[in-house]
Image (cartoon, helix red, strand yellow):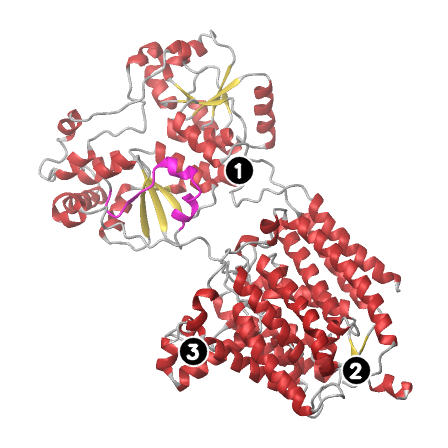
Amino acid sequence: MGPLIPQGIIPMGWDFVIALLIGIAFGFVLEASGFSSSRNITGVFYGYNFVVLRVFFTAVVVAMIGLQYFDYFGWIDLNQIYVLPTYLSPMIVGAIIMGVGFILGGFCPGTSYTAIAIGKIDAMVFTGGLFLGIFLFSEFFPFFEQFYYSGNMGNITIGEFFGISNTLFTLIFVVIAVVAFYVTWRIELRVRKNMTQYKF
Amino acid sequence: MNKNYIILMGILILLAAGLLVLPLKNNSKQLDPEKLMWDIVQPTRYVSTDEVAKMIIERDPLLVLVDVRPTEDFQAFSLPTAFSFPVDSLATDDAIPALTFDKRNLVLYSNDDLKSDQAWIIAKRLGLKNIYVLKGGLNRWIQTIIQPEAPAESASEAEFNLYAFRQGASQYFTGGSISIEQGPQAEVNVSRKKKAKAAEGGC
Amino acid sequence: MNQEIDIQDRPKYINPYFGGVLLGLVLLLTFYITGRGLGASGAVKSAVVTTVDQVAPEHAGQNTYMKNFISDDHSPMYNWLVFESFGIFIGGLLSGALFGRIKKLRIEKSPKITNKTRLFAAGIGGILFGIGSQFGRGCSSGAALSGTASSSFGGLLVMLLMFGTGYVVAYFFRKLWI
Amino acid sequence: MHVHELNPKKTMVTMIIFVVVIIIGLVTLSKPRLNYAITPEETVMLVGSEEGFVYPYELEDILNKTIDTIVLVDIRNTFQFGRGHIPGAENISSVELISKENIKRLEDLKNAGQVVLLYANNLVEANGPYMLLRQIGFDNVKVLMGGYSYYKIWKDKLADSYSDDSYFMGTADYDFAEVAKSNSVATNGNSNSETKAAIVVDRKKKGKAAEGGC
């Protein structure tokens, strides 16, 4: 029966109301998990706070498992789910640029909105930077238009890429996540011993 | 470490492993055989030649005529606006997208009921909706629309009205509107819907 | 630092795994209702396109990238992601109010750097993120989180490379944070 | 230092709710009672081959009990069946054809090596149920061409129907292109015979009685 809106079960007019409600839930969870603090977020790179990894991996794992069960039960049609298309080389470049931006800015777009909500000036500057960055990208788009569309692999799934079933990949991913949870917990304990407290 | 964490992680791994042991699911969107049988025994899939003639004359935008006869037959003669889709094409992967029209009514026809009925059953099984069969096919089309038989004098007024309509339709399909009659293939300008488009996302 | 006061003062965040499960369920619900995942940078893109379209409509129409997002019948701001991002902001407000984290405007940084440095880094980071998110077809929520959850290979790729790069360059920017 | 709540109690509760939802899903998962045994592609081939069609003249042998591996099944409703049917036929109306008991019966017949010959008033009426049974794996099912209405006319001279072909379906009765071109309004009603003469019917060759597919 799902997804509800593409199937026409919920009329299109509700689209934006639902977007707002989902956004509120998303923002609430982000803020409540501590993503409104850039020092909290970047802790994942220095080993003193792995909250990003924990929240992120748990969320991916829960959603991944849920989607596949729901598909199995016939509650949701995976064929109608938007699978992000893969453009190999632009995505590699983009991810690397984002990685550097992540370390410098200490936010990602979603978390910066919640940080603005609780009054962080750095988050406002970050969002301003985002605006400028996308503007620059559009302005200079003709120079790398060809690159932008290169390496198109279509809506390929992880399972298709590695030649395994998506369910098997889910299991592998869960195991990796659990191992990561354990390892980062040990690391965090060790790093925090040698660290001074920091203000938020 | 809190033992609840161990339980949590255990649950996650179990859930993921559970996905693997689930029996293979019939992943297709094919119609359940029981429902298909239910549809088969209903006569509701048939539309009469008169209805179709009326729809063609009124240029009903919801009508999509599908000729399931072999291509040669289609080229020799076809109903106005029809497009050719031989029964064999149902075996290809393109069948579903090619026959998916948003909220429009597909009417299959062949020489009589048999081939169109068979195509209907397969299309229905493939999960297509809003498909119908032209009752009596082209044979009845000729009998009723192109060469209508005058009712007996004792016939009811309704029958005479029908006959009058058929005579008009006959005129329309043979003499009155050669432009339509002669260029059906050229007019196959059916706006086809692409495969159910996945919702677009983006960040 | 007085340990006692520190415990009183410090913000209480929810258990990260709890946050993760909730976020996963929100994401699942989003997929269930809308058929697509969450996103955030798309709203800024809409804002950029709208601004350029307002200031210099001809220029926006000529730009090969921006014209993809301009349509005649409605403003680019009339977009799912814009509403969703506004929701993220409200959600942040709600949570901040609930846990008492909404305070006067402030800058969060390592004590080793000045406010200026922090803001400069945040701005550069934002610019880089903006550019990167366009190449990557989404940011951390759109590509990495939703993409990976829907088993998209691109999503996994962006997630791994983004965090991987973070680790590689983290050493050079350590002063910003610790 | 930012501190998160360490007690995973709430996490456990949410997780258990999630698991319960999945268990509910598993429990309520409805399994279809019947499954397709052949693919749509194979069905298209089946439709093209017409190997499951039985000619009326082959009934002669069946009714004479020369061939005893065939069970005749009348899939019309009981009322029509009561008004007349082919001798020896049993009545399973098409609506009940795939009920639990009848599927069981069909399976027993299949295991016993019996061929089930369906018929209704005409071929088209029986063709749907025939195709469905074929698709769910009953490859011992066949269908009678012409149906009961044809049988009723020819029942005393079934063997003679070998030379008749009015029960054939799927063929064109007219040369459509010709008929469509002729301005038939003036000649309507009586011109049938004329145009009919011009038909070139490409018709399937009948098999010989001996290899009639039984």
Write down the chain letter for disc 2: C
What numbered label is drawn on residue C11? 2
C-alpha gap between disc 3 and disc 2:
40 Å
Mark in the foreground, 1 or 2: 2
Tell me what residue is drawn at x 81 percent, y 63 percent. Answer: A183
Regarding mark 3 in the picture, which secondary structure is present there?
Answer: loop
Nearer-the-camera pick, B159 or A159 = A159
In the rendered view, would you say B179 is above or below D57? below
Find residue A42 and report its horizontal and vertical position in percent. Answer: 72, 76
C-alpha gap between disc 3 and disc 1:
47 Å
What numbered label is drawn on residue B33? 1
What span is in magenta? B79-100
Nearer-the-camera pick, D73 or C63 = C63
Q: Is residue A17 visible?
A: no
Find residue B28 and report its horizontal and vertical position in percent. Answer: 54, 44
Nearer-the-camera pick, D107 or B7 = B7
What numbered label is drawn on residue C75? 3
Tell me what residue is drawn at x 76 percent, y 88 percent. Answer: C111
Q: Quadrant of the C terminus of chain B?
A: bottom right
Nearer-the-camera pick, B98 or C137 = C137
Q: On the image, which quarter does residue B109 sit in?
A: top left
Q: Residues within 10 Å of mark 1 (few under 14, many from 20)?
A: many
* B92 inside magenta stretch: yes
* A35 inside magenta stretch: no
